[in-house]
Amino acid sequence: MAINPIKHEMPTQDPQVRAHNFNEVALGYTEEIALEEASRCLNCVNKPCVSGCPVNVHIPEFIAKIKEKDYEGAYQEISKSSSLPAVCGRVCPQELQCESKCTLGIKFQSVGIGRLERFVADYHNANNTAKAVAPASNGHKVAVVGAGPSGLTCAGDLAKKGYKVSIFEALHTAGGVLVYGIPEFRLPKSIVAKEVDTLKQLGVDIETNVVIGKTLTIDELFEDGYEAVFVGSGAGLPNFMNIPGEAYKGVYSANEFLTRSNLMKAYEADPTTPIMKGGNVAIVGGGNVAMDAARTALRLGAEHVYVVYRRSLEELPARKEEVEHAMEEGIDFRLLNNPVEVLGYNNPDDPRDPKNGFVTGIKCIRMELGEPDEKGRRRPVPVEGSEFVLDVDTVVIAIGTSPNPLIKNTTPGLEINKHGGIIVNEDGLTSRDSVYAGGDAVTGAATVISAMGAGKLAAKSIDEALSNK
Amino acid sequence: MYRVVSRKELNPTVTQLEIEAPLVAKKAQPGQFIILRANEDGERIPLTVAGTDPEKGTVKIIFQIVGGTTEILNHKMVGDYLADFVGPLGVASEIEGLKKVCVVGGGVGCAIAMPIAQALHDNGCEVTSIIGFRSKDIVILEDEFKACSDKLIVMTDDGSYARQGNVTVPLKEMLDAGETFDEIITIGPLIMMKFVVATAKPFNIPCTVSMNPIMIDGTGMCGGCRLTLVQDGKRVTKFACVDGPDFNGYEVDFDEAMSRGRMYMDYEKHARDAACNLFKKEAK
């Protein structure tokens, strides 16, 4: 039988409809589509896809189980490597990871590994009623700082080995970026809650409202009997452009905009946390966070949403599917444009005019691609005299974050790099004995799956260190 | 869940609650703040720690009813619970080495100024306190200030109690008369702090202000609490939640902070009315 050269399309909500609701955009493969897509897998002997996965999911093995219609078996196969399959199937940039290595991809489109992973995880969540069982305790206590992707992964792996794990989370809900950053329409919060529940069934204790570095220090955790600490405290303060007008009302960091909408549920009808809705909105940046902010603004009722990005479509760092979805929904991409000033309203005759200080527009300059920089990316250069103004009411800056300063400030001996990231060795160990770290706290803003990979690595290192004690 | 242990109405719009939160109580220092959610699905609001009892494991907060959440908070009685209570956040006020300080508080800001005056007093510092209120019926914490101040001046805008005028009047008189301080620490409405700074400037006395911008997470993630400092002619963005809330008053761009503070003013009024209506309905 000839191989279908095309990856099966992901069924989605109609763009015109989904642009006005917060329900999940991608609906997931049906069993029929999943079986057909699974049949495209060549089951290569050398498994190149596995090497493309930061947590080395046994990809051909789980796809083989799908072919046998043993979906629960497929789930168990994924679970050997990944603690959060329903999350990864949705948010991983597969085209840069597993699918980029797929043998089929050399001639045809690669196998839809991410979509199959999601199918398997959703099947499990819908059909499996058995609770996870906490294994017998091995008597060791480990503390995890932050209930985001790296912390949840590290905690899950250790709990499965019998460690007593406590996660300390600063916010009122577990999930980290999965609940405050990634919107409902891309990752339903019920899925995150389900993954967190599974960890609790494994005996993981989650203490919300505890800020390590403030409420308790890392040294106090050791005094309390924890034998190792994993720091997955995540992204920190948002970067701004340092252009005039960024303090006008209506200028948000993407972290703030998304936190208001996602964590604080400002998208609901009568929210307790306010957010600016409607009007015209400009998002500055081109990553996944920028796409999330743009599509959130649209769903909050914006008339027109621009994405202003200083390079071209080719360099746009966001996950491909998100860019395509955003375009289908009518997001207006203004590529090769860079903001130079945010404009605001100031009534010279009336200092008490309530409109004073609110955003009215964003002044941009056109860019062209010049010589490649040290990373090989062509450097954008401003075109002199090409400034123009987009009339907008809200500006969301999505140009990255710097690691959170709270832990480094209160943990003597913890070394950090010049960007504020915690320095770790190849085992995930920091400069402090028995203190491990991973995720955005180490790398600066990166992906969910790379954070999970770091959590996994640290769990392995912690297990090796403590089981030899 | 965090239990309300005691409750005291300081005036018709300002209430003090004592909350059971042992970890926060153990750590909190004057000048630091907490973030709370009154109920599940409520908004997160920052409030400065007004006092702690580490042995009892309790933290005092004082708040003025301005929006929906503070309205809901004001309906919490002894034995009720707050959904979330996290802290202590922010950097504690620096009081070490100060020998003679003037503490200037305005309105509900006095709730934050008082523990700082107390800490200074306990450190053997000579404390002059100037506290100002709009009118007699909203004067708070006068006895507490009296107990920790070597000199206390109470002002009301309308003259309905103590001396009439705003807090800068006696401050300027003292400074003009040659009085000097190691530092002036001021906490209150932005406009008041701006004028305290302007009053102190000709006399070159270090002036610390406590900023209370809009916040969400309060842990250095969202950037909503950003403000601008002018340092050596350069504009620098700082975050009140991790860099503050105390800042050098001479560097703060108050006009910008005032404008940003009004971002959700209409919304806050609406939210408070909605919360009020809800409680009225329940009472029926």
Image (spheres, rainbow, N blue to C red):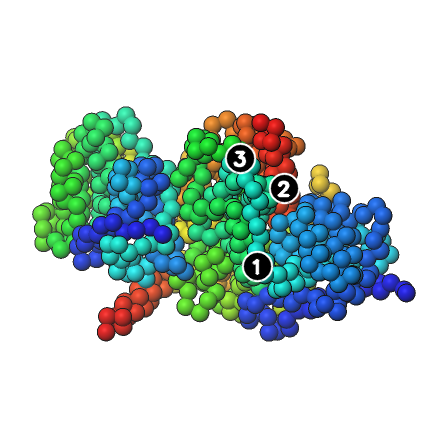
Instruction: Identify the residue under disc 2.
Output: A456
- The label nearer to you, 2 versus 3, is 3
Disc 3 residue crowd, few under 14, some 14–19, many 20+, Cα 10 Å? some
Nearest to N terminus: mark 2 or mark 3: 3
Report if residue B174 is visible in the image: no
Disc 1 residue crowd, few under 14, some 14–19, many 20+, Cα 10 Å? some
- Name the residue type under label 1: Ile
Name which residue lies at 61% across and 37% down.
A458
Question: Are discs 2 and 1 both within one chain?
Answer: yes
Q: Position of residue A19 (x, y in %)?
A: 58, 70
Disc 2 residue crowd, few under 14, some 14–19, many 20+, Cα 10 Å? many
Above or below, A197 relative to A410: below
Q: Position of residue B182 (x, y in %)?
A: 25, 29
Label for residue A140? 3
Instruction: Report, in whole angstroms, how far the alpha carbon at label 3 lies from the one at label 1.
Output: 30 Å
Element type where label 2 sits in the image: helix
Label for residue A191? 1
Element type where label 3 sits in the image: loop
Quadrant for the N terminus of chain A, please: bottom right
Q: Does the residue at mark 2 contact the one at mark 1 (Cβ under 8 Å)?
A: no
Name which residue lies at 51% across and 32% down.
A227
Label for residue A201? none
Instruction: Report, in whole angstroms, how far the alpha carbon at label 2 lies from the one at label 3.
Output: 18 Å
